[in-house]
Image: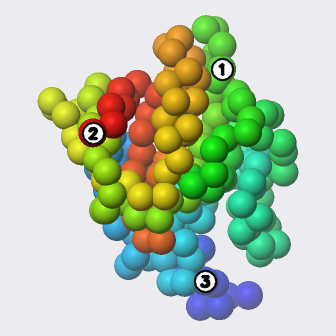
Amino acid sequence: MTVLDLAPVWRPANHQALFRLILDIAARPGTLADLSAHLGDAPASLAALATFCDNTQALADLTGTLDETAWRFLDAQRAAPEGAGFILAAGGTAPSFTPRIGTLDAPEGGATIVLLVDSLSEGPPLTLSGPGIKTTNTLHVTGLAPDWLVARARWCADFPMGCDMVLTDATRVAILPRTTKITEG
């Protein structure tokens, strides 16, 4: 296989561009990154996972959307959600697990949950505040079950422990670190 045979999401130049876009929005919670120029037919969720995962990571795919090619390129170990560092889940379905939240000595052990949502530009507003946000930021999301926000508040209640969330629609990504406070409306 040559670079020309690779799907665009796996090509080195695109992969580096995706990394830069995702890293940039990680510092600005709730800011959207449009990844469409680098995805080809791949979903934004795969681009996010490709940025985060490697052979040292454990991944739980609760959606069943990752095919064998994606697993080979991600090179992550398959795991149950309770033990995974990264979890791919459907935002419209309430969480049925408790992710890793790290410990006081090792808060970086908290999981990152990548949620597939319908849209990051429509729907009811979420008001965001906290580090990386000047005053507040507003994110409109459809396809996110309210139970996710309730569970996230519980999982992130004892900072520095908690989990980080990455919301993705077909082509865009928004990152919600554990330090971001979310208010509906």
* Residue at (54, 84) in percent of width and height: 41
Label 3, label 1: how far apart the Cα atoms are: 35 Å
**In front here: 103 or 3?**
103
Label 2, label 1: how far apart the Cα atoms are: 30 Å
From the top left corner, tell me how far across and down residue 106 is, in percent: 64, 16
Check residue 7 in the rendering and tell me which mark sits there, or answer none.
Answer: 3
Tell me if residue 71 comes above or below residue 125 in the rendering: below
Label 3, label 2: how far apart the Cα atoms are: 39 Å
Q: Closer to the N terminus: mark 3 or mark 2?
A: 3
From the top left corner, tell me how far across and down residue 142 is, in percent: 42, 58
Q: Determine which quarter of the picture holds residue 141.
A: bottom left
Which is in the foreground here, disc 2 or disc 1? Answer: 2
* Residue at (43, 71) in percent of width and height: 171
**Residue at which label 1 appears:** 102
**In front here: 53 or 103?**
103
Label 3 SS: loop
Question: Do labels 3 and 2 touch, CB within 8 Å?
Answer: no
Label 1 SS: loop
Drawn side of residue 112 relative to residue 132, left or right: right
**Residue at which label 2 appears:** 185
From the top left corner, tell me how far across and down residue 182 is, in percent: 36, 32
Q: Closer to the N terminus: mark 3 or mark 1?
A: 3
Farthest residue to the left: give it. 135
From the top left corner, tell me how far across and down residue 75 is, in percent: 77, 58
